[in-house]
Image (tube, coloured by chain):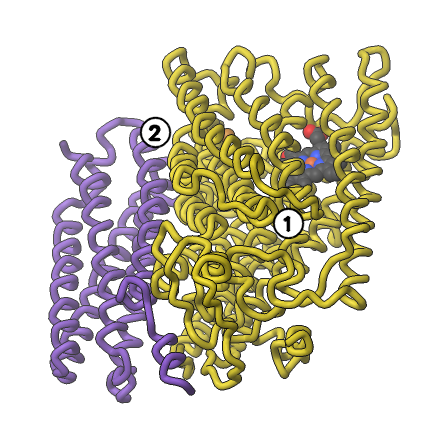
Chain colours: A yellow, B purple
Amino acid sequence: MTEAAVQAPHSEYGLWSWLTTVDAKRIGVLYGVTAGIFFLIGGVEALFMRTQLMYPDNTFLSADTFNGLFTVHGVTMIFLFLMPMNAAFFNFMIPLQIGARDVAFPRLNAFSYWVYLLGGLLLVSSFVVGAIPKVGWTGYSNLSSSFFTPGIATNFYVVGLLVLGTSSMAAAINFITTIINMRAPGMTPLRMPIFTWTALVTNFLLLLALPPIAVALGQVLFDRTFGTSLHVPSGGGSATLWQHLFWVFGHPEVYILILPPMGMVSDILPTFSRKPLFGFSAMVYATVAIGFLGFGVWAHHMFTVGMGAWGAAIFSAITMLIAIPTGVKIFNWIFTIIGGQFRMTTAALFAAAFIPLFTLAGLTGIMHSSPPIDWQHHDSYFVVAHFHYVLVAGSVVGIFGGIYYWFPKVTGRMLSETLGKLHFWTFMIGINLTFFPMHFLGVDGMPRRVYTYQTGFNFDTWNFWVTIGAYITGASMLILIFNIFKSLKSGAVAGPDPWDARTLEWSISSPPPEYNFVELPQVTARDDFWHRKYELKNFQPQPDNQQVHMPPPSYWPLITALGLGVFFTGFVFEWYVLPFIGAPITLIAVFCWSFEEFEM
Amino acid sequence: MSEASHEGGHHTSLGVDSRKLGMWIFLASECLLFGTLIFTFLLYRNKGIEEPNIPAEILDIPVTTASTFVLLMSSFSIVLALHAIQTGKIKSFQRWILTTAIGGIVFLGFQTYEFTEFVQGGLGLSTNVFGSSFFMLTGTHGFHVAIGVIWLLALYFSSLRGGLKVDGALKVDTMALYWHFVDIIWIVIFTVVYLFAVV
Ligand code: HEM
Ligand SMILES: [Cu+2]
């Protein structure tokens, strides 16, 4: 069994097999590795910024470069690291957790990945050609007009996000269909693992939040390319339309970033507490409620624009409402740990640390929901502290938990626990030293998005320590990378169920065979695997059968994505022949795709 | 291949084919796409125009009513096409699917005529925000119709070559969903853009 467990799941491993793969697990690995590389790029950008801010009146970076760096850092971290990293987990884990052989649309899945990769390369190429976008990750309009940012730099932001949105949209349709329609017999909605639930809600948020921003980006592209004025006040356009459309997407987006890590934490804690998740259905309803409410609060990002007492009061109240389902989640996690037999593995540590760290992020969030407080904090380092607690101390910490938890499933090898704990503690020290003092800096009045500050404002000490914290965080990442490479080479063999876990993915070998399950599991309970192991005591490992019919590889997704890439690249560089080359390539590729022999 | 694994490949939880379900989900997002475009149009409906009643003067209601009628009829003909393929009447299917495609082409012809008229009358894409939001909204819809026409023709030619033997009814059913959606959205656009201008 252990021999089989480390066996490669595929006979073919050449480059071509990766370019044409339609296996969700391999696509998941592609997503994960690519997102990991972008995480490092975004991290280096952050370290550059922090080096500049270490001392007052520093001249390490120019104001212009700094503007470029915070823009690309934000865009990279959100669109090229966090969202695709979540997609990596969706790809690998959703089919396993619901007992399916693959996703509903394997080729569309490959297409999503290739479009993401091309979008990422497009954004990175702005460095190569020296035209880095400088409009912030929010790309506020007017600043994004060709009057204020002439040249092609802003095109990278506008078109890059359109490309990445296309990728996420295709992925959302795919994952929603998969979860709704590909569940194993007996896998009723309330028996689905909580990570799959958060994935479902997240993908619905993507599905419904991406169109408004796509339209807004299209309008800005038209403004810049064809001379319309939809977002240009001097030509009759509205100055706030962009803000509304951006945040109608932008607020659901923060749940898109945090819900999957919450799901990971909710799967990890029960395993390491040897106890079912406390309040499972309450957790599901809270997730769905957060998803709904998330669409009704966008204007809390716009309190300083001015919307009158009623508008501010309503958006403030709905924002505060979100604290209720969020609180439900926090108590559920705590009560999952209490009374269990908690095992201090690295995965469990990250998952447990998520609870207080995310609570802190949520508390400053509730503060912002009050307009008078928000007027004070807006565009200050307090906000930078808040959203980094959400994104780093929340999402990233949850994802690290997920990595330590599922790495054995994906690779068949264990990560080193010693290195893992070293990573955990250095990371905790690093991020808290980086982001906690930012609260003080913000309250003391340090504005966000400034490239330097003068001495004498009480900013010097904390900025110094914040930068030290950033270096510690960076060093801590090196431990994780070392751990991953070391384990891939010589890690202990994991076996199918190294953690004595509860959900279906642990009932098959590690790494799983291409077809996941020979026999589709017949699900009879929540945490079915645990139920069979300990309650029914009738767990049967899957038979060894290599004969399951799986969809053949296809290169059309890649070619379709390339066509789309050529099409959009034309709009970035303003070479308008490219769209005329890219469009027919895409069209022909879609044709060949749909007529390809592809039995599912 | 074991019996269980063969069944597994075709098992779906809802008993609906995933392609059709996927189309429903896609259309949900399309609602927001058009919703945002319509919202923008409503915002700019009376902006950047010298006199408030110009939309009423420039929009040609009778012509658009005719093109709307054609598009609605094509929704009817695709129902007939679907019925034909479900009952195995391939010849009748081919006739109705071609009728549907022609309906779409006629609609696009009307739209091209309308756009040219406007541009010649001095209302271009970037003349003012009314024009921009009008052209972007109706143009996006026209783009959807164009994609639909290509898709319909692909189904037609594919069936000529005997290509719809496997899952044919399902493929047409999925296409029909899309086509009905494009029609329904047009009714909304027709109401908001054209009829609102005269009331
Ligand atoms: C050690 C890790 C990190 C450090 C040291 C760091 C540091 C910074 C700094 C210095 C800024 C500029 C603040 C300003 O001038 O307004 C910034 C902005 C930002 N960061 Fe990070 N960051 C880190 C990780 C992340 C991660 C993991 C994410 C998201 C997943 C993220 C998301 C953002 C966003 C969205 C912005 C705002 C960009 C903008 O203003 O347009 N950061 N970060
Ligand atoms: Cu928000």
Question: Is A238 located above or below residue A520 in the figure?
Answer: above
Q: Position of residue A338 (x, y in %)?
A: 57, 35
Question: Is B66 located above or below residue A290 in the figure?
Answer: below
Mark 1 belongs to which subunit? Answer: A
Q: How many numbered dots are placed on residues in this image? A: 2
Question: Residue visible at 62% across and 68% down?
Answer: A510
Q: Nearer the viewer, residue B103 or A482?
A: A482
Q: Position of residue A290 (x, y in %)?
A: 43, 35
Quarter holding the N terminus of chain B is: bottom left
Question: On the rendered structure, is A473 left or right of B27?
Answer: right
Question: On the rendered structure, is A71 left or right of A524?
Answer: right
Q: Are there few (<14), some (14-19), or many (20+) residues within 10 Å of tag 2?
A: some
Tell me: is circle 1 under 8 Å from ligand 1.
Answer: yes
Amino acid at dot 2: Lys
Secondary structure beneath disc 1? helix
Corner quadrant of residue A173: bottom left
Q: Which residue is mark 2?
A: B47
Corner quadrant of residue A387: top right
Q: Which residue is mark 1?
A: A81
Amino acid at dot 1: Phe
Q: Is residue A71 visible?
A: no
Q: Position of residue A347 (x, y in %)?
A: 67, 48
Mark 2 belongs to which subunit? Answer: B
Question: On the rendered structure, is A180 left or right of A578?
Answer: left
Question: Is B10 located above or below residue A242 in the figure?
Answer: below
Secondary structure beneath disc 2? loop
